[in-house]
Every structure is written in C-alpha cells, then in structure tokens.
Amino acid sequence: MKNVIRKRQLPHAFDVKSQQSAMVNKANYDIMVKTM
C-alpha cells in the first residue's frame, strides 16, 4: 500500500527510477547471457 501512495505522490520520479532499473536489469541480463 505504501508503494501505491508513493507512486501517486511522485509519479514522474517513480517512472524514471523504474525505467532506469529496467535498463540496468536488461544490461545485467545481456552480460549474463554473453558470459554463459
């Protein structure tokens, strides 16, 4: 519930942060696939 409230209060910051983490996760996944 706290996350939902926070998301409504700071929608832009939350979107930016989730986009960044998604990019990082994809980069980490790509690196993992290449090293395997």
Image (cartoon, rainbow, N blue to C red):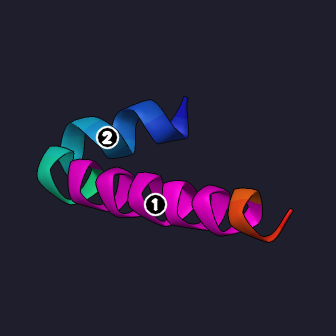
Q: Is residue 12 left or right of residue 9?
A: left
Q: Which residue is mark 2?
A: 7
- Residue 4 spot, x, y in % from top left: 42, 31
- Pick whichever, 20 or 33, lies toward us: 33
Which residue is farthest right?
A: 36
Q: Is residue 26 left or right of residue 33?
A: left
- Snapshot quadrant of residue 33: bottom right
Q: Secondary structure at mark 2?
A: helix
The amino acid type found where label 1 is placed reads: Ser
The amino acid type found where label 2 is placed reads: Lys
Looking at the rendered image, the quarter that the N terminus falls into is top right
Mark 2: give few (<14), some (14-19) or many (20+) Cα within 10 Å.
Answer: some
- Pick whichever, 4 or 34, lies toward us: 34
Q: Which residues are magenta?
A: 15-32
Q: Main secondary structure of the magenta part?
A: helix
Closer to the chain start, of discs 1 and 2, is: 2
Marks 1/2: CA–CA distance? 15 Å
